[in-house]
Amino acid sequence: MPDKLGKDKQRYITGIIIILCLILILSINHIILVWTILGIAYLFGFGESIKLFACKSHWMMYLLAVIVWIFAGINGRPIESAIFIAMVMAGYLAYKKSFHPKQILPFIYPSIPFLTIFAIYKDFGSHAIIWLIIIVALTDVGAYFGGKAFGKTPFTSTSPNKTLEGAIIGLAIAVAVGSFVGIGGLSGNFIISLLISFGVSLSAILGDLYESYLKRSVDLKDSGKILPGHGGILDRLDAILFGAITMHFLLYFLDIWKDTSIMYI
């Protein structure tokens, strides 16, 4: 019992520190600061993914990961940067005749999702990041407490502790709140805001399941240990990483921040 209380206290302290850091970063709202902090998180997450994919680590992978992030900051095309570097990595491994297909995977996950978060900030500003965080956080919190109160039906064997009822409640709360958060300076249209909130919330659930699947496949409880009480970077950001891809795609697909919106064609 004392051990559990100690872990819970550690978890809460780390959570508060993370929230305060987020508030500070988004209050300063400077692209170089965001790029730097997000880049540090990305490199830790990249290292964790190598363990999750059970692939052979190579110094070239870390070097290319750094180059990916630098390119993303310089050329303004974050996602294309990851794809380009993944191609370079594949070519290098083939040339050296030491190709291990799994070594490409960290350049897909978490590289592309992390770069997508940076792309959201660069293209749509801090408000979009706040919107993303609110949707994902409410999905997670709603699912946890909803599952505790009403959960009876197991959601999936991938994550036995989650329930279908909890997932539905989390989704409903996130969509209800997220739909209003996205109005005004974000989308200006309730229906569009609702669709994006729904897509992001659903993706957050899938991201959490995917991370659970990866950890179970290599018999790991946590992806890392950098965040006391929480585990690794990917343990905390799994849902946000999946949600970010959906948000960025829908923001462009619906073209909601531009005058030539396809909704009015």
Image (cartoon, rainbow, N blue to C red):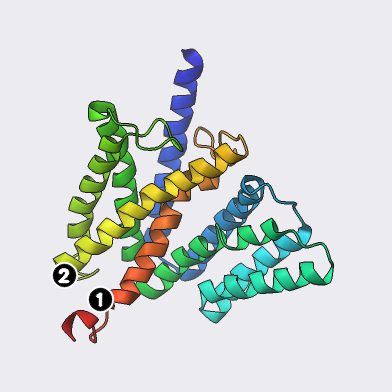
Query: Identity of the amino acid at label 2?
Result: Asn
**Disc number placed over residue 189 in the picture, else none:** 2
Q: Residue 76 appears at what percent x and percent y?
A: 51, 79
How much space separates mark 1 and mark 2, taking CA atoms? 8 Å
Check contact, mark 1 vs mark 2: CB within 8 A: yes
**Disc number placed over residue 52 in the picture, else none:** none
What residue do we see at 37% from left, 54% from top? 203
Q: Residue 101 appears at what percent x and percent y?
A: 70, 60
Q: Which residue does the numbered mark 1 point to in the structure image?
A: 256
What residue do we see at 56% from left, 37% from top? 216
Circle 2 Cα neighbour tier, 10 Å, few/some/many (<14 / 14–19 / ≥20): some
Q: Residue 62 appears at what percent x and percent y?
A: 70, 60
* Side of 88 where 22 appears, left or right: left
Q: Quadrant of residue 104?
A: bottom right
**Secondary element at tag 1:** loop
Q: In which quarter of the image is residue 194?
A: bottom left
